[in-house]
Amino acid sequence: MAPADRGGATVLVLALGLVLVLFGGFGAAVAAARLARQQAAVAADLGALAGAGRALEGPAVACGTAGEVVSANGARLVSCRLDGLDLVLTVGVTVAPLPGLSRAAEASARAGPIRA
């Protein structure tokens, strides 16, 4: 007579599967956060360059132009100011790496004329 099957292997395979799913979820959350940080950095760089091109027209025009470019890149303008002819801005991107969990990634950029 064969020994009775107690199902130990089934429990082990299910536990291993759960561990793999948890690691996969953690990896996806980290990747989403890094992607949001990169998106914020790109939006900040492009917004600063666009706004700096309009710096001679004043802070309202320069920051307005930067805000349009930042929004077109999926971010929000957190702060914007002119420092001489340099435009300094900070942008933010909200990311939800896991359901029910949201975080904000921010990046800053500065752009202006070349100084010799």
Image (cartoon, helix red, strand yellow):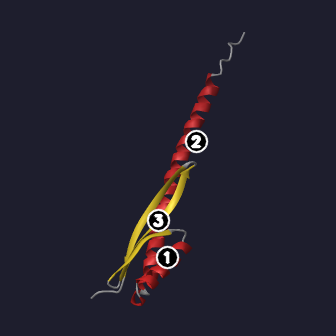
Q: Which residue position holds label 3? A: 92
Q: Secondary structure at mark 3?
A: strand
Residue 81: image tag:
none
> Looking at this view, is 47 or 2 the one in front?
47
Amino acid under disc 3: Gly
Query: x, y percentage for residue 92?
Result: 47, 65
- x, y percentage for residue 47? 46, 77
Mark 3 to mark 1 CA distance (whole Å)? 12 Å
29 up-or-down from 45: above or below: above
Q: Which residue is mark 2?
A: 21
Q: Quadrant of residue 58?
A: bottom left
Q: How many marks?
A: 3
Query: Residue farthest to the right?
Result: 1
Residue occupying the far front of the picture: 60
Quarter residue 85 falls in: bottom left
Closer to us: mark 2 or mark 3? 3
Which amino acid lies under the numbered mark 1 shown in the image of this protein?
Gly
**Residue ranking furthest to the left:** 116
Q: Is residue 1 left or right of residue 34?
A: right
Q: Secondary structure at mark 1?
A: helix
Between residues 102 and 20, which one lies in front from this camera angle?
A: 102
Work out whether mark 2 precedes mark 3 in sequence or the reverse, and give the earlier one: 2
Q: CA distance from mark 2 to mark 3?
A: 30 Å
Residue positioned 50% across, 68% down in the render: 76
